[in-house]
Image: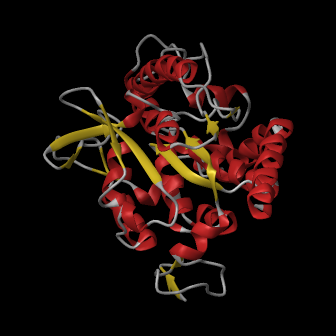
């Protein structure tokens, strides 16, 4: 197996199973439960909580056979559907510095370039197509011109993931088949509906947004908590904007949020409201909601282990419901075997 840039592991579908546990498509397909679907919601850096949730599902013997993802959920879902184990995803999470996946751009099409992220995904996902994945996978994006939801289930996976996570005003829209696409959170941030349409019997959804009225710059929160030393690890666009605005602020008010804080919060308000409506109209059997509201949408936190553990805790809080689904699936499998 080949080591890539000391950031993770790469494999090909030609390998049935190597020393790290990667499986070929048909082998992976036999290990999952086709009647169980998993919807992974968007939320920027909060998405690391998805891996924590997956670790708990794995412990309870739940192996989703269909996955749908939006934004950060699309990214984690792509790795799961491709064949990465929870342990391997966690290893990649620990080794990769988030800020190296993005770069500033000055062409007027967006503030941040996702080209480093594109290359990272191409290395680890092998430029694969949806049709090649061992686990059926759906990615949600938004058509910028029509405003309609776009669901990908065919074609290049990396392009779809980048489109699904293209936050308007921050990343440039991604053009696919003549359509300009942006973050899927504007339409369906926790995509349960593709799982239902696929025909799964049980659905589990992970929501990374919570109702909140807080709006203050994260550097202010850290100064109040005496946590200035942590700033080196907690980086966000809002922090950079805050540092710059403090130089020119005349009213002396540290309570005034900067432009990126406002943009991130405005996006979160829109997404949270629509998300709640969509989850009411298409209710999952189990809804897992990690407490990660302290992590901003535009944050580039490197404290991933904390976010991971929030995902673990939220999934454990739904232990009874998860065990019930695991028991039903096991009973159905046993009955089918007897027949």
Q: Nearer the viewer, residue 297 or 33?
A: 33
Percent across and percent down for residue 243 are 46, 33
Q: Nearer the viewer, residue 148 or 218?
A: 148
The residue located at (49%, 36%) in the rendering is 191
Percent across and percent down for residue 162 are 35, 51
Q: Find the residue positioned furthest to the left.
A: 178
Q: Nearer the viewer, residue 140 or 255?
A: 140
The residue located at (59%, 13%) in the rendering is 213
Q: Is residue 325 left or right of residue 320?
A: left
When the figure is inspected, residue 61 is found, relative to residue 141, above or below; the finding is below
Residue 221 image-quadrant placement: top right
**Quadrant that contains the C terminus:** bottom right
Quick check: can you spot residue 233? Answer: yes
Q: Find the residue positioned furthest to the top.
A: 251
Q: Find the residue positioned furthest to the front.
A: 339
Q: Is residue 250 left or right of residue 282?
A: left
**Quadrant that contains the N terminus:** bottom right
Q: Nearer the viewer, residue 328 or 47?
A: 328
Percent across and percent down for residue 153 are 37, 52
Q: Is residue 202 left or right of residue 266?
A: right
The residue located at (25%, 40%) in the rendering is 181
Q: Is residue 145 left or right of residue 156?
A: left
The residue located at (46%, 25%) in the rendering is 261
Percent across and percent down for residue 113 are 30, 51
């Amino acid at each position: 197996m080949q080591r890539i840039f000391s950031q993770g592991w790469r494999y090909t579908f030609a390998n049935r199973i190597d020393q790290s546990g990667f499986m070929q498509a048909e082998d992976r397909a036999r290990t999952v439960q086709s009647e169980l679907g998993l919807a992974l919601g968007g939320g920027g850096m909060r998405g690391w909580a998805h891996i924590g949730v997956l670790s708990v599902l794995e412990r309870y013997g739940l192996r989703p056979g269909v996955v749908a993802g939006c934004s950060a959920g699309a990214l984690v879902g792509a790795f799961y559907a491709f064949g990465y184990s929870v342990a391997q995803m966690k290893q990649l999470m620990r080794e990769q510095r988030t800020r190296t996946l993005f770069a500033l751009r000055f062409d007027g099409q967006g503030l941040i370039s996702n080209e480093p992220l594109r290359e990272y995904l191409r290395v680890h996902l092998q430029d694969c197509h949806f049709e090649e994945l061992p686990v059926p996978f759906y990615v949600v994006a938004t058509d910028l011109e029509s405003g309609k939801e776009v669901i990908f289930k065919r074609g290049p996976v990396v392009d779809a993931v980048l489109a699904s996570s293209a936050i308007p005003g921050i990343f440039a829209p991604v053009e696919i088949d003549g359509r300009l696409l942006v973050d899927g959170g504007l339409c369906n941030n926790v995509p349960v509906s593709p799982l239902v349409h696929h025909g799964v019997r049980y659905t589990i959804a992970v929501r990374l947004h919570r109702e909140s009225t807080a709006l203050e710059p994260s550097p202010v929160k850290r100064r109040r908590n005496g946590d200035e030393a942590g700033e080196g690890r907690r980086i966000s666009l809002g922090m950079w904007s805050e540092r710059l605005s403090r130089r020119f602020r005349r009213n002396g008010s540290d309570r005034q949020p900067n432009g990126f804080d406002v943009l991130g919060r405005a996006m979160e308000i829109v997404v949270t409201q629509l998300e709640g409506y969509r989850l009411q109209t298409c209710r999952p059997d189990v809804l897992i909601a990690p407490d990660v509201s302290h992590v901003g949408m535009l944050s580039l936190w490197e404290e991933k282990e904390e976010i991971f553990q929030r995902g673990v805790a939220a999934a454990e809080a739904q232990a009874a419901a998860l065990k019930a689904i695991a028991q039903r699936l096991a009973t159905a499998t046993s009955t089918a075997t007897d027949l």
